[in-house]
């Protein structure tokens, strides 16, 4: 009898080895909340480039901008939440280094959902009358075939070659669970993608997933997941409640460093020159140093 | 009770935006609108739904920066989209730029969309908000830098842009009110050009006009914005914002 289930556990680098330059990649989370940062860091270490990134953007977009990985960005905003703007994203836009495809944030959901439903588009009122129509000249409207005759935006499907999302728990088969209050659009990103990769804080046995949690926390089914990565603290420095909140101190350090090329080179050397284990070790070390300095002050 | 401050006048001006709003989600951006929304819930709009800024609907009133009294529902971002698409929401956003017909920009400054002079946060939900439910604006620093003759990018759809886009854009379009640190403005004119509805105590009509990069409509004598009453002042000072964060938002 063939196996009824597949073990999909992988490492970050194995996930990235399945990606190619020029792909369209969706990144889950929202702003600086539950971003699959260990997978993003793995992209930074790789030689893939010319990516089209679709995201409710946060420091994932900022870091990919800083590393020159993004050719085209499909987004409704890029923000660090507690700090409104991401400096690397701003710098990339102001230098004209990335092609901007900006939609209303609800339109991004419509586009992903259309892709997940294998539809060419979904009608929406959002976008009408706004600059989104003029800055996306390919964006079309469609007339309702019914008596109302309304003229609405036909939001095109945002089909993804791959999706990267971070969850709190998952099993080896790809059933993934969020334990915070919002799944954001991670499930839709996965469903809109040819291949979806879920990183998580901890891989557990299937039976454990619902031992202490409501079934509604299991929003991502193995049917849409190609790979599972165990990545403790993998969303750092974004929030991953209830496992941990945003590392505000680190986020401030990221923003400060981004303001100055020398400081940024130092930040990269300190945190982004090695693998994920090196990153996590550097973060722990910085935490200790920061703590003692804070205590002395 | 000492005299109301400008920030407190702004709080009640924001709260008055939601008088009798009914059972809709009120989404305020910024400190003063947040205090205003909770004041509205405590006084003239007891039915409104308020989120905690994350994914929960709250009960009661609570101080800015504090924890809500309790929760009555779950409202992840996807549900917020569904509520706004169905029109059961009134948002108050903070413009980067706002023009005389209510077009609003928070995306970018400059004329080249692919290479802006200054990149801001992005259009966010402004295009969808403005064509689907009532939208108001809060301008903490009323100046010709924000109140411009023409926005560099239309994120929030103004009356002229909605009209140009046609009936589907206009069907639920409703830019209700603009509260600034100097005045209250609305669009109650025949062509929906922005009108000076009231000036805050201590501000002249000339002063408000000078701080605006386009001609404001004035119909008759411009009244003064009302002052908060004693009960409102007590709620603001003792319950909703005991640390006085509202004053910080107005520091020029």
Image (cartoon, rainbow, N blue to C red):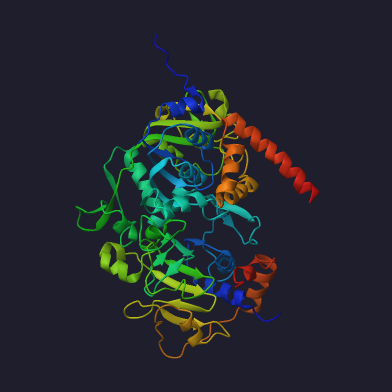
Residue farthest bottom in this picture: B221
Check the picture and name the quadrant holding the N terminus of chain A. Answer: top left
Horizontally, residue B55 falls left or right of residue A289, namely left
Whether residue A237 is visible, yes or no, is no
Q: Is residue B137 above or below residue A181?
A: below
Q: Residue at x 67, y 68 (%)?
A: B244
Q: Residue furthest toward the front? A: A262
Q: Position of residue A60 (x, y in %)?
A: 49, 42
Q: Could you tell me which residue is drawn at 36 percent across and 63 percent down?
A: B111
At a point 45% along the width and 35% down the height, the residue shown is: A164
- Picture coordinates of residue A117, whole percent (x, y): 32, 38
Quadrant in which residue B113 is drawn: bottom left
Q: Residue at x 45, y 91 (%)?
A: B221
Given residues B117 and B238, the one toward you in this image is B117
Rendering quarter of residue A185: top left
The residue closer to the viewer here, B217 or A116, is B217
Q: Position of residue B123 (x, y in %)?
A: 41, 57
In the rendered image, is residue A106 in sight? yes
């Amino acid at each position: 009898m063939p196996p009824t289930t597949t073990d999909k556990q992988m490492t970050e680098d194995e996930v990235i080895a399945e990606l190619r330059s020029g792909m369209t990649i969706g990144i889950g989370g929202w702003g600086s909340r539950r971003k699959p940062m260990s997978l993003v860091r793995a992209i930074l270490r790789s030689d893939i480039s010319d990516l089209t990134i679709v995201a409710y953007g946060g420091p994932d977009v900022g870091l990919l901008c800083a590393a020159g990985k993004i050719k085209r960005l499909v987004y409704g905003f890029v923000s660090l939440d507690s700090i409104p703007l991401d400096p690397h994203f701003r710098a990339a836009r102001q230098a004209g280094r990335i092609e901007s495809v900006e939609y209303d944030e609800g339109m991004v959901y419509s586009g992903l959902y259309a892709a997940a439903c294998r539809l060419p588009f979904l009608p929406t009122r959002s976008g009408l009358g706004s600059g989104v129509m003029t800055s996306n000249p390919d964006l079309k409207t469609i007339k309702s075939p019914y008596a109302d005759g309304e003229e609405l935006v036909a939001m095109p499907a945002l089909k993804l070659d791959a999706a990267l999302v971070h969850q709190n728990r998952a099993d080896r088969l790809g059933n993934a669970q969020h334990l915070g209050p919002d799944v954001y659009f991670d499930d839709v990103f996965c469903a809109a993608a040819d291949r979806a990769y879920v990183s998580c804080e901890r891989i557990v046995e299937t039976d454990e997933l619902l031992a202490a949690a409501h079934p509604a926390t299991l929003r991502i089914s193995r049917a849409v997941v190609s790979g599972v990565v165990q990545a403790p603290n993998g969303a750092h420095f974004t929030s991953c409640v209830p496992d941990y909140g945003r590392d505000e101190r680190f986020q401030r350090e990221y923003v400060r460093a981004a303001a100055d090329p020398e400081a940024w080179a130092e930040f990269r050397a300190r945190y982004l020159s090695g693998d994920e284990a090196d990153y996590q070790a550097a973060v722990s070390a910085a935490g200790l140093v920061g703590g003692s300095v804070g205590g002395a002050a | 009770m000492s005299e109301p401050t400008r920030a407190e006048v702004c709080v009640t001006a924001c709260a008055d935006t939601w008088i009798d709003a009914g059972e809709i989600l009120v989404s305020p951006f910024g400190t003063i609108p947040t205090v205003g929304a909770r004041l509205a819930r405590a006084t003239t709009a007891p039915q409104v739904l308020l989120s905690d800024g994350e994914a929960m609907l709250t009960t009661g009133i609570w101080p800015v920066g504090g924890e809500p009294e309790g929760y009555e529902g779950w409202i992840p971002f996807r549900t917020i989209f569904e509520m706004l698409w169905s029109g059961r929401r009134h948002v108050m956003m903070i413009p980067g730029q706002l023009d005389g017909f209510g077009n609003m920009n928070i995306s970018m400054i400059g004329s080249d969309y692919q290479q802006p002079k200054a990149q801001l946060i992005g259009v966010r939900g402004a295009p969808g908000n403005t064509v689907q439910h009532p939208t108001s604006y809060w301008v903490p620093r009323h100046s010709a830098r924000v109140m411009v003759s023409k926005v560099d990018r239309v994120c929030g759809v103004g009356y002229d842009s909605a009209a140009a886009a046609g009936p589907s854009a206009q069907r639920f379009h409703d830019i209700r009110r603009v509260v600034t640190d100097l005045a209250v403005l609305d669009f109650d004119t025949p062509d929906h050009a922005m009108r000076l509805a009231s000036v805050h105590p201590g501000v002249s009509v000339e002063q408000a006009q000078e701080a605006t990069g386009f001609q404001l409509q004035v119909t008759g004598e411009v009244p003064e914005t009302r002052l908060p009453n004693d009960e409102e002042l007590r709620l603001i000072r003792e319950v909703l914002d005991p640390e006085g964060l509202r004053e910080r938002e107005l520091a020029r």
